Amino acid sequence: MLWYNPTLDQDMPRWVYASWAIGLFLYQTFDAVDGTQARRTRQSGPLGELFDHGVDACNTVLEVLLFAAATNLGQSWNTILTLFGATLTFYVQTWDEYYTQTLTLGIISGPVEGILTLCIVYAFTAVKGGGSFWQQSMLQTMGIKEHSIIPDYIHDLRFNEWFMVYGGFVLVFNTLQSTLNVMKARREQGKDVYAPLFGLLPYFVTWIFVPLYLYLQPVILHYHLIPFTFYVGLINAYSVGLIIIAHLTKSPTFPMYNVLTVPLGLAVADSMGPIIGLWPSVLGFGTYQIAFVFLCMGLAIGVYGSFVYDIITTICDYLDIWCLTIKYPYNEKDELKKSK
C-alpha cells in the first residue's frame, strides 16, 4: 500500500487487492481457531486472551488504512470517520467485557461479518481492477435513474460513502447494545448503572482532540494522515490493552488515563494559541507539525511496545510458560498418573 498508494486514492495492481483479501481471510481463520487449539492443548490462559486482543487492536488500524486505500477514500475526513467507527467498536466491546465479564459481539460483529465484508470488498476491487470503481454513484451504477422521491445527494452517494452509512448504523446499534449489556449487568449486581459510562470518557476525550487537531492542521489531514492514523490507532490499542489487563486481574478500578493522549492534547492547545490570540504556536503550521506527528507515532510504538513486552514477560515468568511456544506440552497419560 505504501509503495503503490501512499495517498490512499490511487488504483493499484489487481494482485495487491487480492493479497489483502487472502491475507485477511487467513487472519480471520487463524484468529477463530487459535482459542480452540489452545484449549485442545490445555494451553489457554490470560496471556492468550491478552495477546489475541492486542493483535486485533493493532490490526484494526491497519484494516482502516487498507480499506481507505481499496476504496480510494484518500487522506480525508472519510478515512478519519472510518477510523473513528473501527476504534470505537473495539473500545466499547472491551469496555463491555470489563463490566460484564463476557465478550459480547453485536449481531453484525467486526471479527466475523466485518472482516468477511472487507474480504469481499478487497476481492471485488481486484476483479474490477482498482478502487476507482467505488468512487461511482451506487444508484447510477445499479441503473436507478433520478427521481423526485430520491434527493439528489442520496442519488449521487458513491459506493464508498454507502459503506460508511452502513457502518454508521452498525456502529450505533452495537454501541447501544453494549451499553445496555453493561447497565443490565450492573443492575443485576445491585450497583450504579450509570457509573460505568464514565469509562467511555477516555475514548471520547481523545476523539475531541483528533478532529480538532486535524481541523487546525490541514497539512496533516491531507498529506500526512497515515502516520497520524497509526498514532491514533495505537492510542486506542494501548487503552484497550489497559482495559484487558484490568479485566484479567479483576481490578475494581477502570483505567481512565492514557499517557499517549497527552501529546495530542498539547498539540491542540499549541495550535489554538494563535487563533484565540493568547500564545504563539511553538510547532507552527508546517514542518515542525509534520515532525511532531512522526515523533508521536514513534512514541506510541515505543510505549505500546514496552507495555506489551512488560506484560508478556511478567505473565510468562509468573506462570512459568513461554509466549509463542509450549513449554510444558500436555500429556494425558502423565496427567492421569499425577491424579492418581
Image (spheres, rainbow, N blue to C red):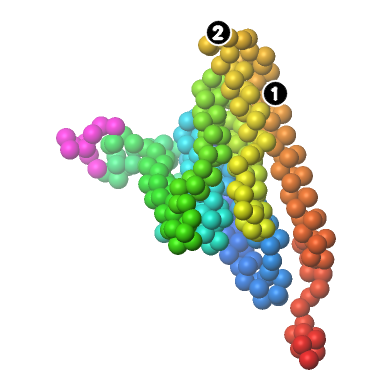
Which residue, as the protein is rendered here, is positioned at the far left?
148
- Is 287 in the magenta? no
* Residue type (three-letter) at the residue carrying disc 1: Ala
Label 1 crowding class (10 Å Cα cut-off): few <14, some 14-19, many 20+?
Answer: few
Residue 59 point in image, percent of width and height: 61, 49
Q: Earlier in the sequence, mark 2 or mark 1?
A: 2
Q: Residue at x 47, y 36 (%)?
A: 81
Q: Main secondary structure of the magenta part?
A: loop
Q: To which residue does mark 2 refer? A: 277
Q: To which residue does mark 1 refer? A: 291
Residue 88 point in image, percent of width and height: 51, 44
Q: Could you give the CA–CA distance between mark 2 and mark 1, rounded to whole angstroms?
A: 24 Å
Find the magenta span and give its range: 144-153
Can residue 23 be seen in the rendering of this structure? no
Q: Nearer the viewer, residue 313 or 253?
A: 253
Which mark is on residue 151?
none
Q: Residue at x 56, y 16 (%)?
A: 272
Q: Nearer the viewer, residue 95 or 283?
A: 95
Q: Residue at x 23, y 34 (%)?
A: 151
Which residue, as the protein is rendered here, is positioned at the far bottom?
340
Q: Nearer the viewer, residue 70 or 244?
A: 244
